[in-house]
Amino acid sequence: MNEVYFFDSYAIIEVLRGSKSYRRYLKADIITSQLNLFEVYYAILKQSKKHAEEFIKLYEGYTVPYTTQTIKTAAQLKLALKNRKLSMADCIGYVLALEYRTKFLTGDKEFQDLENVEYVK
């Protein structure tokens, strides 16, 4: 069984780009949220609808659901760290990683020093 990581949008994009820093995660099991799919789909859509559709088909099976409690905890995190530029999607993703007992994989410097984060630039 492979190690499981919560891939935030940054991590997904780096994997899609073929980033050397993220190669070791190609064999990892992935979970992510629909919000992260939205962010990446939108980024790709600006360049190519065909590639955006290919992406969504490939990644839609990796999403995990979240609850009202997830939303509340993520909002509390965003408020507690209000001096950082944390997106709603990233806050929910970080909380999901904690709930699913997996590492939050990101290259977002705002998360670099938080517990349960695998920071890869």
Image (cartoon, rainbow, N blue to C red):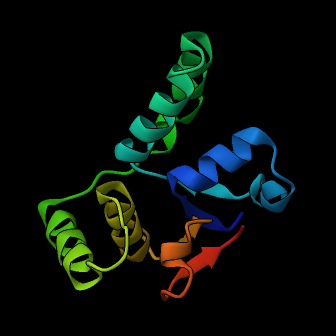
| Residue drawn at x 25%, y 73% as measured from the top left | 78
Is 120 rendered above or below residue 57? Answer: below
Residue 70 rendering spot, x and y as whole percentages: 22, 66
Locate residue 84, reporting x and y percent: 37, 76
User: In the rendered image of this protein, does residue 57 appear above or below residue 81?
Assistant: above
Q: Residue at x 33, y 66 (%)?
A: 91
Image-based side of 86 in relation to 21, left or right: left
**Quick one: 28 or 113, which is closer to the camera?**
113
Which image quadrant for residue 71?
bottom left
Instruction: Report the side of 69 relative to 59 (left or right).
Output: left
Q: Is residue 86 left or right of residue 22?
A: left
Residue 47, given in percent of the width and then of the height, sits at: 59, 19
Residue furthest toward the top? 50
Q: Quadrant of the N terminus?
A: bottom right
Number of numbered labels in the structure image: 0
From this view, report whether residue 88 is shown above or below residue 100.
above
Quarter of the image where the C terminus is located: bottom right
Q: Residue 64 in the image: state x and y as whole percent.
A: 38, 51
What's the residue at 49%, 89% (across, down)? 115
The residue positioned farthest toward the front in the image shown: 83
Q: Quadrant of residue 72?
A: bottom left
Question: Which residue is at 77% across, 58% downward?
Answer: 22
